[in-house]
Image (tube, grey):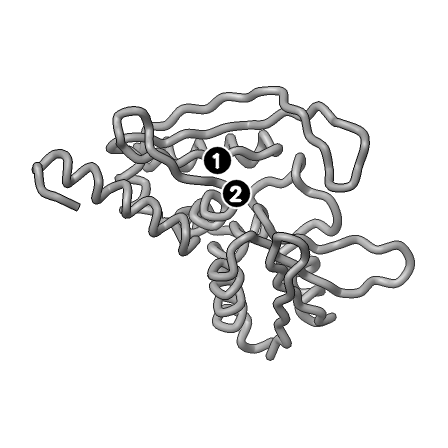
């Protein structure tokens, strides 16, 4: 029931952990206003019973969707068992996600933390880069069961948080779906993020134009 929301949360959502009093806050952030608007509508649709007061504000180059609601916060943490605080390296598919929701969940994660681009031969590629090995491996398993061929890998990269002097070495876990399998991925799972979806479709149009010899 909440597969897409939970995927988006595991990628770009957060339940901040504050010292002292808990502010019962949920947040999502993205560079694109269209993505923020999509999440606002998703929250209204999926959690209509909570009558959420949803806000959007700009923070630097990010659009932040936030909800401050004790009942909603308790539902996420106590009923859905979502962790509070940092989760990037430890997050896994929440136990409340059913097998029937796996596709929506994958769409939520990759649509948020993934990106699309064209390979050297013009075919589309979908790539996921995250810090959580468990989550990457579980998504890989789901794609394998759907017979969507893909590759995985990892690398050590430098990470410098905003306004920080120290550079951290972090392990990044990658998953790539390309060529015909990227198109199969799109047809079976989809890309919720409006900007990335349009970009993917544009790449597909480019491939079709080249194969048929028709102008774009």
Question: Given contact means CB atoms under 8 Å apart, are the residues at marks 2 and 1 in contact?
Answer: yes
**Nearer to the camera, 23 or 146:** 23
Residue at coordinates 40% horizontally, 48% vertically from top-left? 196
Residue 95 x/y as whole percent: 57, 48
- Mark 1 Cα-neighbour bin, 10 Å: few <14, some 14–19, many ≥20: many
- The reply to whether residue 100 is visible in this rendering is no
How many marks on residues?
A: 2
- List the single residue furthest toward the front: 215
Relative height, residue 53 to residue 60 (above, below): below
Q: Earlier in the sequence, mark 2 or mark 1?
A: 2
Relative height, residue 133 to residue 3 (above, below): above
Q: Which mark, by number, is residue 113?
A: 2
User: Which residue, given by chain and number where applicable, does mark 1 sit on?
Assistant: 128
Residue at coordinates 31% horizontally, 24% vertically from top-left? 120
- Mark 2 Cα-neighbour bin, 10 Å: few <14, some 14–19, many ≥20: some
Quadrant hosting residue 125: top left
Residue 168 x/y as whole percent: 74, 27
Give left or right: position of 139 versus 74.
left
């Amino acid at each position: 029931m909440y597969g897409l929301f939970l995927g988006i949360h595991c990628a770009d959502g957060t339940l901040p952990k504050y010292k002292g009093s808990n502010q019962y806050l949920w947040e999502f952030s993205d560079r694109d206003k269209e993505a923020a608007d999509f999440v606002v509508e998703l929250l209204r649709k999926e959690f209509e019973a909570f009558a959420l007061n949803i806000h959007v504000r700009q923070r630097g180059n990010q659009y932040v969707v936030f909800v401050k609601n004790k009942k909603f916060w308790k539902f996420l943490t106590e009923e859905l068992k979502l962790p509070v605080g940092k989760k990037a390296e430890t997050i896994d598919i929440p136990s409340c996600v059913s097998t029937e929701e796996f596709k929506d969940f994958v769409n939520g994660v990759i649509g948020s933390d993934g990106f699309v681009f064209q390979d050297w031969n013009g075919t589309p590629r979908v790539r996921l880069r995250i810090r959580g090995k468990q989550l990457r491996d579980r998504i890989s398993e789901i794609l394998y069961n759907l017979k969507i061929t893909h590759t995985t890998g990892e690398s050590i990269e430098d990470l410098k948080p905003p306004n920080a002097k120290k550079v951290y070495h972090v392990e990044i876990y990658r998953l790539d779906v390309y060529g015909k399998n990227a198109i199969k991925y799109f047809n079976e799972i989809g890309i919720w993020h409006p900007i990335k979806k349009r970009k993917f479709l544009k790449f597909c149009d480019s491939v079709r134009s080249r194969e048929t010899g028709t102008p774009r």
